[in-house]
Image (cartoon, helix red, strand yellow):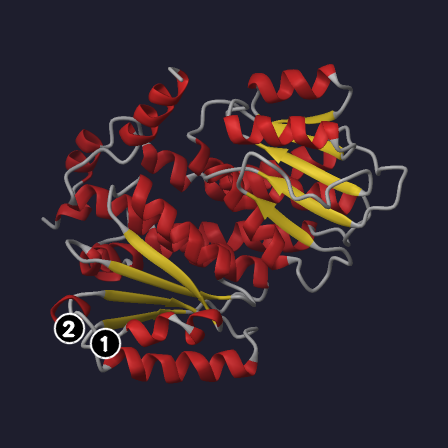
């Protein structure tokens, strides 16, 4: 029996049931939109000139998804800040989202304090911790999320909840129809193409995991649509599969990284390249992808293109993310490792707590 079709073996390795958490994403997205609709937030009384998301890791990827998805709809700039200090432009006309699933991410807590000093309009999102405590103490709105998830598995909560809040505050039109389409698309993808009960012969994620096993992977997205998906793939392969990969974005990589596909030749020919593309990508970016493929193929690297056909761009981007989530899980199984623990992160936090 194929290793990835052996449920008994998978259960032995997956002691914390990461598979259940990944498989539950469609329902999580449905719940997330309801949470956002019911959130006790109100539109700031001042004009909002910019929106800033402060967050790290799994709590920041949701902001990346929303930033890219809404870049042609929001009338104010959105940035994601992965740092201790906010940009200097943050002030009374800033809507600041401080997102930490645990509520105890030190960089996000520092950003909250910085936003407080700068007079920003703050909304906090998470499952509790010091962030919730500080938010309520200072009379800001806090959006409570369900507890019990490793932060990286709460991507639906950290993105779709914000989407509903944006609609509630009047920044965008209601997205309930798009979220319903998204949940349906993810359920179909799980049940028919990528979930554990789909045999390897018909399973896109199991087949990709087999290709990536013992290989270095480079993931390319586009600034128009799939940038956040590429970042997510890299993060999930690191945290779940305990493996290194890299990601970049077109057209930017055409101005630097593309030149690097020449040396070292023995290494390049063993690399697997994942290209995440979409029909909404700029026509020139589409051409750039095709030309870039021809350049990369000369190195001997194998290129794997992924593109979805769902009607909604939100569903297509999330489907690319979901394929990668399952890939990272199956790659962990091939690596004979439990996907849930992140020992190096825990060690880092422990060492920092001593300082």
Camera-side residue: 174 or 47?
47
Whether the residues at callouts 2 and 1 have beta carbons within 8 Å, the answer is: yes
The quarter of the rendered structure image containing the C terminus is top left
Answer with left or right where residue 12 lies relative to residue 43: left
Camera-side residue: 150 or 204?
150
Whether residue 67 is situated above or below residue 96 in the rendered picture? below
Camera-side residue: 293 or 248?
248
Residue 341 seen in the current view: no
Which residue is labeled 1 in the image? 262
Point out residue 130 in the picture as x, y percentages from the top left corner.
Answer: 58, 17
Rate crowding at label 2 as few (under 14), some (14 to 19) or many (20 or more) other CA atoms within 10 Å: few
Which residue is labeled 2 in the image? 265
Residue at 74% over, 57% down: 74
Residue reaching furthest to the right: 45
Point out residue 197 in the picture as x, y percentages from the top left corner.
Answer: 28, 47
Whether residue 264 is situated above or below residue 315 in the rendered picture? below
Answer with left or right where residue 116 lies relative to residue 146: right
Rate crowding at label 1 as few (under 14), some (14 to 19) or many (20 or more) other CA atoms within 10 Å: some
| Disc number for residue 186 | none
Residue at 53% over, 38% down: 83
Instruction: Write down the quadrant of residue 329 in the picture.
Output: top left
Residue at 49% over, 60% down: 227
Instruction: Write down the quadrant of residue 33 in the picture.
Output: top right
């Amino acid at each position: 029996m194929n290793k990835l079709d052996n449920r008994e073996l998978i259960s032995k390795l997956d002691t914390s049931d990461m598979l259940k958490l990944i498989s539950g994403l469609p329902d999580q997205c449905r719940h997330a939109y309801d949470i956002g609709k019911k959130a006790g937030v109100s539109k700031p009384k001042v004009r909002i000139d910019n929106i800033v998301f402060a967050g790290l890791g799994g709590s920041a990827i949701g902001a990346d998804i929303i930033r890219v998805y809404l870049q042609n709809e929001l009338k104010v700039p959105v940035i994601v800040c992965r740092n201790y200090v906010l940009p200097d432009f943050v002030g009374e006309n800033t809507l600041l989202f401080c997102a930490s699933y645990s509520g105890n991410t030190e960089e996000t807590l520092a950003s909250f304090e910085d936003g407080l000093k700068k007079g920003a309009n703050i909304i906090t999102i998470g499952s509790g911790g010091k962030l919730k405590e500080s938010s309520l103490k200072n009379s800001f709105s806090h959006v409570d999320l369900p507890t019990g998830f490793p932060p990286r598995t709460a991507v639906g909560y950290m993105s779709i909840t914000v989407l509903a809040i944006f609609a509630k505050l009047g920044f965008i039109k209601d997205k309930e129809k798009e979220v319903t389409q998204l949940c349906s698309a993810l359920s179909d993808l799980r049940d028919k193409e990528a979930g554990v009960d789909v045999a390897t012969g018909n399973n896109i994620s199991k087949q990709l995991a087999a290709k990536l096993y013992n290989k270095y992977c480079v993931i390319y997205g586009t600034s128009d649509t799939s940038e956040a998906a590429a970042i997510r793939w890299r993060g999930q392969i690191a945290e779940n599969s305990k493996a290194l990969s890299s990601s970049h974005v077109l057209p930017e990589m055409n101005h630097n990284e593309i030149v690097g596909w020449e040396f070292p030749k023995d290494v390049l020919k063993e690399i697997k390249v994942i290209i995440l593309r979409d029909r909404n990508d700029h026509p020139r970016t589409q051409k750039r992808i095709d030309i870039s493929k021809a350049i990369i193929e000369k190195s001997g690297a194998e290129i794997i293109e992924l593109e979805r056909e769902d009607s909604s761009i939100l569903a297509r981007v999330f489907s690319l993310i979901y394929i990668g989530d399952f890939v990272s899980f199956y790659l962990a199984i091939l690596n004979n490792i439990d996907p849930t623990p992140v020992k190096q992160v825990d060690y880092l936090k422990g060492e920092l707590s001593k300082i």
